[in-house]
Image (cartoon, helix red, strand yellow):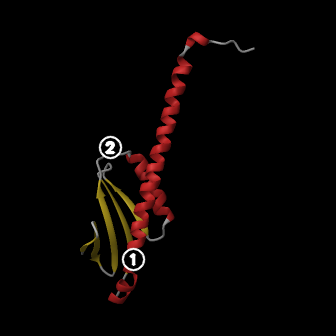
Amino acid sequence: VNFKINDTSFRIDTSRLPFLTLELGYRLDPDKEDVELMRRAAAEVTGGIFIAKVNIHGEGQGVVFCAEFLCDNYIHLRDNLKRYLEIVIESHRRFFELYESMKEEKRKVLEAAQSFKPAMGDNSSKKALS
């Protein structure tokens, strides 16, 4: 079952009834993403939000946010769909916040390493320690 809320497309996988999976997915450009950091961020978010899972597909070609739940009747779905949507949207928000934070931290570490490297290789200012 596919549906849209504003410009965001969602999907409910009903292939394993009464077990349902509500999904929100995005395609990514693996050449522009740090797949290792994405996997770390996905694992951290998945571990921190009950019901929600974040999956990185392939080598960073896509990311899927999902909530898995048991739903054995329409009333349960009707009464809880909004809550499950909120869980998926929250996992999406947390993932990208954490991923961007991790990328920034990595950038700072690399910058610090680059600025430290020339100073280490500069032989003109050798000092004798006593």
Q: Nearer the viewer, mark 1 or mark 2?
A: 2
Chain-order first, disc 1 or disc 2: 2
Tell me whether circle 1 and circle 2 mark residues in contact (CB < 8 Å). Answer: no
* Disc on res. 26: none
Amino acid type at circle 1 is Phe
Q: Residue at x 44, y 71 (%)?
A: 51
Outermost front residue: 6
| Closer to us: 110 or 40 | 110
Per the model, the C-alpha gap separating discs 1 and 2 is 33 Å
Q: Secondary structure at mark 1?
A: strand
Residue under pointer 1:
69
Image quarter where the C terminus lies is top right
* Residue 77 shown left or right of residue 120 in the figure: left
Question: Looking at the image, which residue sits at the far right?
Answer: 130
Q: Position of residue 113 (x, y in %)?
A: 52, 30
Q: Position of residue 13 (x, y in %)?
A: 28, 73
Q: Quadrant of the N terminus?
A: bottom left
| 121 w.r.t. 27: above or below | above
Q: Amino acid at mark 2?
A: Lys
Residue 90 to residue 96: above or below: below
Location of residue 26 (image quadrant): bottom left
Is the residue 10 above or below the residue 105 in the image?
below
Of residues 114 and 74, the one drawn nearer to the viewer in this rendering? 114
How crowded is the residue under tag 2: few (<14 C-alpha within 10 Å), some, or many (20+)?
few
Residue with the mark numbered 2: 32
Q: Residue at x 54, y 26 (%)?
A: 116
